[in-house]
Image (cartoon, grey):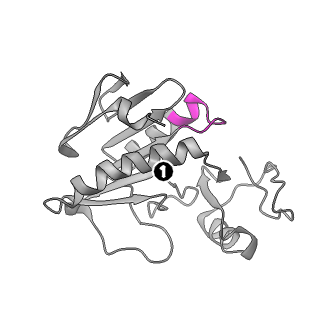
Amino acid sequence: MSIQSDQVSENLPVVIQNKLHTVETFEEFISRPENRDRLFELVNGEIVEKVPTEEHGIITALLVAALVPFARAGNRGRVAVEARHKIPDDAHNARLPDIGFTSAERMLPVVRQGAVPQMPDLAVEIKSPDDSRMEMRDKASYYLKNGSRLVWLVFPDKQEIEIHTADSVQTIGADSVLDGGDVLPGFTLTVGDIFAV
């Protein structure tokens, strides 16, 4: 859902008209009192509000419940939910993956204010009802072009996951086993387990 930066109503977002936002104007927008409890990301200069459903939240929780213990075992890295990420030379994007994993080798000090100045090694996006498959794939492409090595696109309506790397795209269904590839070696999860809502 796109938001006009001078929006007055908290409940009636308006589509932006011919306004390209920078990370600087985005940061000012999200710091306003009326926006502090809402989730926004900056996508190619457009402020987009994320409005997750209960199904989205359950799937996020189930994936995080599997990823966190695996990441902590052996200090492999850390997992974050809806942490903002941006790369320093991109003034028009501040992305908010539903889940991100950053390997121990690339971990920076924990960011307590603002965005993480790099993309996670693994970015996970879970489709909301108003997301199109093309929008989801555009997100995957952005992450991979800017430092992520693996992207999982989760499609609850089809009970499938698209696995994106720099070299390939693979779609697996509920009976398949999701693995972490080179990013999370040894991680496995039956796909159907995350759709058990």
The reply to whether the magenta stretch includes residue 15 is: no
**For residue 112, above or below residue 54:** below
Mark 1 neighbour class, 10 Å CA radius: few under 14, some 14 to 19, many 20 or more:
many
Q: Position of residue 69 (x, y in %)?
A: 24, 56
Q: Is residue 113 left or right of residue 23?
A: left
Q: Quadrant of residue 111?
A: bottom left
Seen from the viewer's position, the closer of residues 167 and 77 is: 77
Tell me the residue at 25%/62% (across/down).
106
Q: Is residue 43 left or right of residue 35?
A: left
**For residue 82, above or below residue 109:** above
Type of the residue with mark 1: Asp
Q: Position of residue 156 (x, y in %)?
A: 51, 31
Secondary element type, mark 1:
loop
Count of picture labels: 1
**Which residue corresponds to mark 1?**
98
Tell me the residue at 55%/55% (across/down).
93
> Magenta stretch?
127-136
Q: Is residue 12 left or right of residue 72?
A: right
Tell me the residue at 37%/52% (across/down).
64
- Classified by dominant secondary structure, the portion drawn in magenta counts as loop
